Image: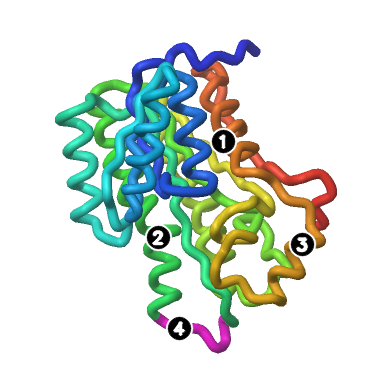
Amino acid sequence: MVLSMDRWVGKVAIVTGASSGIGAAIVDALVENGLIVVGIARRSELIEKRAKELSLSNKKGKLYAFKVDLTREDEILSAFKWIEENLGHLHVLVNDAAFVSEELLTEGNTEIWKRGFDVNVVAPCFTTREAVKIMRKNDIKGHIIHTNSVAGHKVSPVPKMNVYAATKHAITALSETLRQELNALGSKIRVTSVSPGLVVSEMTVLSKDISEERKKLFEVRPILQAEDIADGIVYVLSTPEHVQVLELTIKPVGEPH
């Protein structure tokens, strides 16, 4: 199997949750490989700063920032409209944005639960729907990638994760549902769910709100870097058009679960 990113050079990609962590690393990797990337997030100023840095480093691709609250369907639609009108047809969508809060399920806050499902499940449904519309209309053999989690396949024994594992199990089901639907439609759009183990990010060890309990738990576990996940996404994109990596699980060596 020959791996190559050549067919994606100059093509348009969207990365949600692109302001930090895994999303920011994915943006860097795609720009490095020549894609025109639109990073969408609420903290678009961080993406704009990174876009300026990348423009000075003579990368093959280019980064744009677009401010979006992913719980707002109207803002998602505005972003897709702007991209289509200004940059061209979408070829790659990476749904990376995620939300987690540290609290017990039995004592949880209803609005926090709703935000978890809105960001982790409903928003990827919105973006995927719009991406598939564009790809099918323009006969594009595109690629939809969901950043999932090992918690999307087995509930991890980490305290106070409340609805997070449920939202990620939903992504596992949605990825397979999408694959089957695209098959039935005769589409050549590929689907991949990428499931990392513990990763350095603002959701884990870099969280400002992390409890001492969770901090101690994470300190004794092996951990991945955001760039490890970005490399995995480049790998699935670089496989031949007839190859579909539906699920890619990435764990650090020594991961106990």
Tell me the residue that label 3 is attached to.
219
Q: Is 71 one of the magenta-colored residues? A: no
* Image marks 1 and 2: residues in contact by CB distance under 8 Å: no
Judge left or right: residue 133 versus residue 224: left
Q: Which residue is mark 2?
A: 119
Residue assigned mark 1:
230
Magenta highlight range:
105-110
Crowdedness of circle 2 by 10 Å Cα count: few (<14), some, many (20+)? many
- Circle 4 or circle 1, nearest the eye: 1
Q: Is residue 106 magenta?
A: yes
Q: Residue at x 32, y 55 (%)?
A: 42
In percent of width and height, residue 5 lies at 50, 17
Q: Earlier in the sequence, mark 3 or mark 4?
A: 4
Three-letter amino acid code of the residue under disc 3: Glu
Of callouts 2 and 3, which one flags the residue occurring earlier in the amino acid sequence?
2
The mark nearer the N terminus, 1 or 3, is 3
- Judge whether 138 appears above or below 161 on screen: above
User: Spatial distance from mark 1 to mark 2, Cα to Cα?
Assistant: 20 Å
Q: Residues within 10 Å of mark 3 (few under 14, many from 20)?
A: few
Give residue 169's position: percent from left, percent from top.
56, 58
